[in-house]
Amino acid sequence: MALLLCLVGMTAALAHGCLHCHSKFSEKFSFYRHHVNLKSWWVGDIPVSGALLTDWSDDTMKELHLAIPAEITREKLDQVATAVYQRMDQLYQGKMYFPGYFPNELRNIFREQVHLIQNAIIESRLDCQRHCGIFQYETISCNNCTDSHVACFGYNCESSEQWESAVQGLLNYINNWHNLVSPAFRCLEPPHLANLTLDDAAECLKQH
């Protein structure tokens, strides 16, 4: 289990955020970066604000601290993006601000965005678990912005028949997953984890 959590952490560390997967991200943040020099009376605010905008995506992933993969539905990504762009556009509509105000507001929007993404990912996972048996939903991977899906096992079964069907579906899912796993990763399956060392895990990953 510890190794699996470690691998999840490694995946998160390689990611570049979630908002950058939105179709308007490049256009919006290009505008924000190019107009940052018009937003503060103090020249010291300009490089600080520019760095915040440039590192926005990477810093987002660093702050998510999720124990599950960073995968978000398109609907929730649109909701997060709309909220962030609205706040940013309002900030940029103002004239020049007093020293320190503009970068502080950027940090506030950034933190709000992180919370929105965290909630969106967790809420989708909780909604998934309210079903009975195996359930899958379409997502976007924040690692590389490709289409992905999340599967979970829901416990909201109301009869013995539903439970029987749910358990059978789970067993079928596990068997299908086992058949699709690359042989290079068979060493990471549960029966082999008990005696697996870090060196063994590293060698296993190199084989892929």
Image (tube, helix red, strand yellow):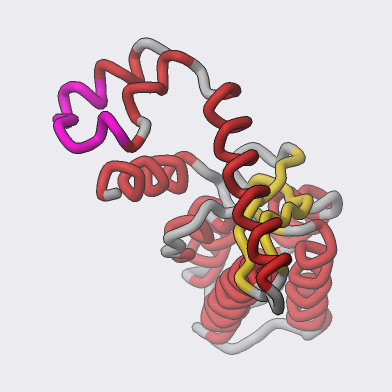
Q: Is residue 63 left or right of residue 40?
A: left
Residue 14 belongs to the span the image colors magenta: no
Q: Is residue 12 left or right of residue 109?
A: left
Q: What is the quadrant of the C terminus in the image? A: top left
Of residue 89 and residue 201, the one placed in the foreground of this image is 201
Q: Residue at x 81, y 57 (%)?
A: 74
**Main SS category, magenta section:** helix
Is residue 48 shown above or below 4? below
Q: Report the number of numbered marks.
A: 0
Is residue 202 shown above or below 68? above
**Residue 85 sits in quarter:** bottom right
Of residue 12 and residue 187, the one placed in the foreground of this image is 187
Which residues fall within the magenta stretch?
A: 191-202
Q: Residue at x 60, y 80 (%)?
A: 112
Give coordinates of residue 97: x percent, y percent.
65, 86
Residue 198 belongs to the span the image colors magenta: yes
Q: Residue at x 18, y 30 (%)?
A: 196
Q: Residue at x 64, y 37 (%)?
A: 144
Give coordinates of residue 17: x percent, y percent.
58, 52
Extreme residue in the front direction: 160
Give coordinates of residue 15: x percent, y percent.
52, 44
Give coordinates of residue 178: x percent, y percent.
53, 28
Residue 51 appears in the picture as rendered: yes
Residue 117 appears in the picture as rendered: no
**Residue 185 sits in quarter:** top left
**Residue 124 sits in quarter:** bottom right
